[in-house]
Image (spheres, rainbow, N blue to C red):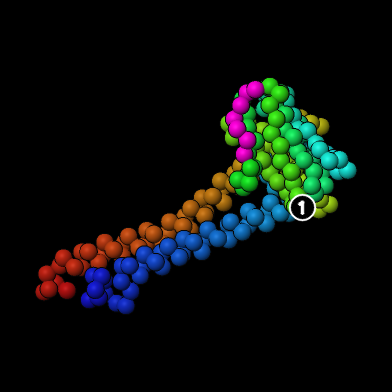
Amino acid sequence: MTENGTRGGMGRRDLLKATGAAGIATAAPAAAGRARAQEDGFGNWFENVGNYDGIQDQTGTDQVTVTVGSQANGGNFGFDPAAIRVDPGTEIVWEWRAGSHNVVHQDGDFESELTNEEGFTFTQTFEEEGINLYFCSPHQQTGMKGAVVVGDIEVDEGSAANGNQEGDEGGNGEQEDGGNTGSTETMLIGASMLAAFLSPIAFAIFLFSRGDRTDNEPTAYR
């Protein structure tokens, strides 16, 4: 019997370390996948954004204004324009029109205050090339999301552009089908990641319980 009360070469403390390492190893590829998706394009970001109609070219200007609380997504729940392309060094000014909103970068690089003050402004200057996704935290699920593409980089617009355009041309049925498919895929991926993370933990608990029962057995039964 080892010092930690389990038979064999691995103690409970070592088993916990191994379990934690397995969980980290499972989560790391998922995080890397999200980073690559953001670098390459929008993915499903604009899937439920009713006022997204492609990337508006705003290159060649030093300052661009984006309206916060424009009429979209069933109310004053839009950024207008939803997606823009600018040169490095361009200043973006978000100006509030209606509703209580904020501007939050997906990766936490910036965040405005939450306010309903009409005419309120929030500014950010983008120096580096890349894709910056942002949202309004109270209304993200409603579809209040936006993007700033900085520099002359190729962007994969994902299923968003096709889904919204087909919905406009062919009716709401096609757009809703695309949204449901994307949501189902996201749920399946999340469930798979959760199962992979919990499996080693459940196995560790099982071994611990076996070790405890073994420790409490009389010597004659071991």
Query: Residue 21 falls in which quadrant of the image?
Result: bottom left
The part of the chain drawn in magenta is: 111-117
Q: Residue 204 appears at what percent x and percent y?
A: 35, 63
Is residue 100 within the magenta segment?
no
Residue 115 appears anywhere in the view: yes
Q: Residue 187 appears at what percent x and percent y?
A: 56, 46
Residue 139 appears anywhere in the view: no
Q: Residue at x 82, y 47 (%)?
A: 87
Nearest the eye: 139 or 101: 101
Q: Residue at x 59, y 30 (%)?
A: 114
| Label 1: element kind | loop
Q: Left or right? Give the position of 82 relative to 28.
A: right
Nearest the eye: 62 or 213: 62
Query: Residue 141 falls in which quadrant of the image?
Result: top right
Query: Residue 106 falls in which quadrant of the image?
Result: top right
The correct choice, above or below, for 66 with respect to 129 in the image is above
Q: Left or right? Give the position of 211 relative to 113.
A: left
The correct choice, above or below, for 94 with respect to 57 in the image is above
Nearest the eye: 161 or 221: 161
Q: Residue 51 appears at what percent x and percent y?
A: 75, 31
Q: Left or right? Give the position of 19 relative to 160.
A: left
Quadrant housing the N terminus: bottom left
Kind of residue sitting beneath label 1: Glu
Residue under label 1: 129
Quadrant housing the C terminus: bottom left
